[in-house]
Image (cartoon, grey):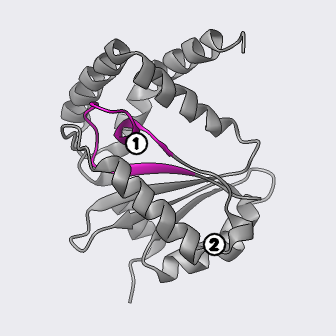
Amino acid sequence: MGESHANSVERARTEEVRILPYDPTWPDRFAEEASFLKARLPPELIGRIEHFGSTAVPGLAAKPIVDMLIEVPSLREVHQRIAPILKDLGYEYFWRPSWRDPLVPEYTWFIKRDGNGRRTHHLHMLEPDSADWDRLRFRDYLIAHPDVAQEYEILKRDLAAATRSNRLAYAQAKTDFITAVTERARDANSGD
């Protein structure tokens, strides 16, 4: 019938990390997916939808997966109401339980794949007050500072070559760079 959750997690964790040159269709793919989601999800369950990550930075090489941040009223609503809709549409659902209550998600996201099984989109669901909205600071800083974006591209290419089929190691190895740039972005905007 379908892939077990454990198999789905293992598949997602071990898929090859491929960095491709910037594709000018990525913003259009974001806009199409945002429209698709708005047409299928109850409007009271989704707020703003943002394109983030490397595919949102013009000229930056990236994994060819459009990352999206989607505002939701609560992760409980995602778990109970959004996940069933998106799973019926073929999305893979992942969630990490809260340490307070193992039946309530602390973080939720979805993978959308094309007909060949390749990832096309990552949907990250966030509550309005989530600290993860800071990811937009990182995106905006890279757009405003092409030299920093170029440093990031070099780092990503090196890490992709070193980690190949270990997405977790790839993501973790980028953390220090992302944190430092996000702090720079926060400091630069502290006068706003």
* Vertical placement of residue 104 versus 24, above or below: below
Where is residue 80 drawn, in percent x and y? 70, 74
User: Could you tell me how far apart the alpha carbons at marks 1 and 2 are, in whole angstroms?
Assistant: 25 Å
Residue 13: tell me if it is visible.
Answer: no
**Which residue type does callout 1 highlight?**
Leu
Quarter of the N terminus within the rendering = bottom left
Please give the count of numbered marks on the rendered protein. Answer: 2
**Which residue type does callout 2 highlight?**
Ile
**Residue at the spot x=48%, y=21% of the render?**
141
Q: Secondary structure at mark 1?
A: helix
Where is residue 85 drawn, in percent x and y? 57, 79
Name the residue that disc number 1 marks: 168
What crowding class fits label 2: few (fewer than 14 Cα within 10 Å), some (14-19), or many (20 or more)? many
* Residue 56 covered by magenta stretch: yes
Question: Horizontal placement of 182 versus 162: left or right?
Answer: right
Q: Which mark is residue 82?
A: 2
Q: Nearer the viewer, residue 10 or 191?
A: 191
What crowding class fits label 1: few (fewer than 14 Cα within 10 Å), some (14-19), or many (20 or more)? few
